[in-house]
């Protein structure tokens, strides 16, 4: 069926309407629970107002919605198919000579478009809001309303010096050379727990060696004291190579359009970009996963006898299948993240399995 036909546009309209309705409902529920949890955490904090709490809840929502987005699409598709079956519109469409695949074509096209819009337009906004949430969370923990969460430019690291002070390290470039790390254009700031700076150290380069940063061409700035210039300085640290790798910016805080450059940066620096590559490919595959979830919805909801009941089977079967798909995808992603299977296989396996099962069942229903 042509999605631009009258019937195709009607089916697309029904799906989009139900999708928006389910999405608004889920957004409301998530916002309510986030507000309750944040109000519990901020109780007794006189420095935290309701505006700050609301801002944290809103900026965290896109990340949560991203996790449940396939469920939203599946529930919307189930609602659409169940309504068409209950009103006998599905029977009439089939009686007019339209196959199950012709019926699903406009629905799948609309679903793929929703997935593409989510990846291309919504994801950059979601990544930015997730980054803002991390900043707000940092300000909440430090009790400093102007504290800055260091993130995506170059390398930012934070470690505790003692119970009262922390050190923040920024390097504009990091490379792995031989058995060590080479950092260039270093800025190291010592500050208290309220993020108020006490001393700043700048260096042209540094290497990490047995619990020390060997800084070269060093300048030390401290309030009320003249600037000190040193050829070298050994700065004690608890950081090691693995800790530095783990503290690169989270893939979820990077826009889909920026991920290729980020992956290239890490690989040129000699680090593994496995998490970021997995994230990038999973975003690419997500529209196809949404289409697979529509096939699952069709298996449970496209039944001519829905007027006779079976609503409980529809709900339980669909939700259970959704959770199984989610568990399977997370399990396979974990294998890919740890290098047990190729990243592309880890990304495509859940989608292909769900799609093949859905197609098989629908073929059996069509032939039957």
Image: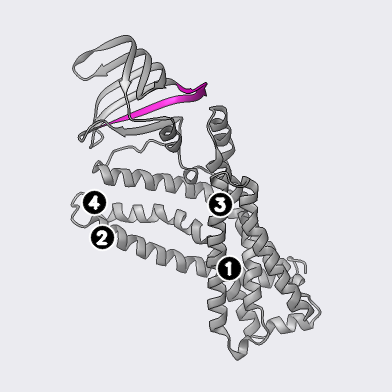
Name the quadrant containing residue 104.
bottom right
The residue singled out by tag 3 in the image is 333
Residue drawn at 70 percent across, 81 percent down: 90
Instruction: Report the span colored magenta.
Output: 166-182
Q: Is residue 231 above or below residue 119?
A: above
The residue singled out by tag 4 in the image is 48
Residue drawn at 33 percent across, 24 percent down: 188
What is the spatial separation of the Cα atoms under label 2 and label 1, in whole angstroms?
32 Å
- Number of the front mark, 3 or 2: 3
Q: Is residue 162 above or below residue 20?
A: above
Q: Position of residue 93 (x, y in %)?
A: 74, 80
- Number of the front mark, 2 or 4: 2
Say whether residue 173 is magenta: yes
Residue drawn at 46 percent across, 42 percent down: 250
Label 1 environment density (alpha carbons within 10 Å; few <14, some 14–19, many ≥20): many
Residue 40: which disc? 2
Residue at the limit of the structure toward the bottom, as seen here: 308
């Amino acid at each position: 069926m042509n999605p631009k036909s009258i019937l195709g546009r009607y089916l697309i309209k029904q799906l989009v309407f139900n999708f928006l309705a389910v999405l608004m409902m889920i957004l409301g529920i998530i916002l309510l629970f986030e507000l309750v949890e944040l109000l519990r955490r901020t109780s007794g904090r006189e420095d935290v107002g309701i505006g700050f709490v609301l801002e944290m809840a809103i900026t965290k929502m896109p990340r949560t919605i991203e996790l449940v987005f396939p469920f939203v699409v599946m529930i919307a598709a189930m609602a659409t198919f169940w309504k068409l079956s209950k009103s006998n519109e599905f029977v009439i469409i089939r009686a007019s000579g339209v196959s199950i695949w012709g019926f699903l074509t406009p629905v799948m096209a609309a679903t793929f478009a929703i997935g593409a819009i989510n990846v291309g337009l919504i994801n950059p906004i979601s990544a930015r809001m997730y980054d803002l949430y991390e900043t707000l969370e940092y300000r909440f923990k430090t009790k400093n309303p102007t504290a800055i969460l260091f993130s995506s430019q170059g390398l930012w690291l934070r470690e505790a010096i003692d119970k009262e002070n922390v050190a923040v390290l920024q390097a504009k470039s990091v490379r792995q050379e031989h058995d060590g790390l080479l950092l260039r254009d270093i800025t190291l700031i010592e500050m208290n727990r309220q993020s108020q700076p006490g001393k700043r150290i700048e260096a042209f380069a540094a290497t990490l060696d047995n619990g020390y940063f060997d800084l070269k061409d060093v300048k030390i700035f401290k309030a009320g004291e003249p600037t000190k210039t040193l050829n070298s300085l050994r700065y004690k640290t608890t950081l090691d190579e693995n800790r530095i790798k783990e503290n690169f910016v989270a893939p979820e805080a990077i826009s889909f359009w920026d991920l290729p450059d980020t992956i290239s940066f890490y690989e040129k620096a000699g680090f593994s970009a496995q998490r970021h590559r997995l994230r990038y490919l999973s975003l690419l595959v997500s529209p196809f996963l949404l289409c697979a979830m529509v096939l699952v919805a069709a298996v449970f909801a496209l039944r001519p006898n829905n007027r006779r009941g079976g609503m409980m089977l529809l709900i339980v079967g669909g939700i259970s299948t959704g959770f199984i798909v989610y568990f399977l995808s997370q399990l396979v992603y974990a294998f890919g993240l740890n290098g047990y299977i190729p990243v592309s296989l880890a990304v495509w396996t859940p989608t292909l399995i769900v799609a093949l099962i859905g197609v098989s069942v629908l073929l059996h229903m069509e032939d039957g």
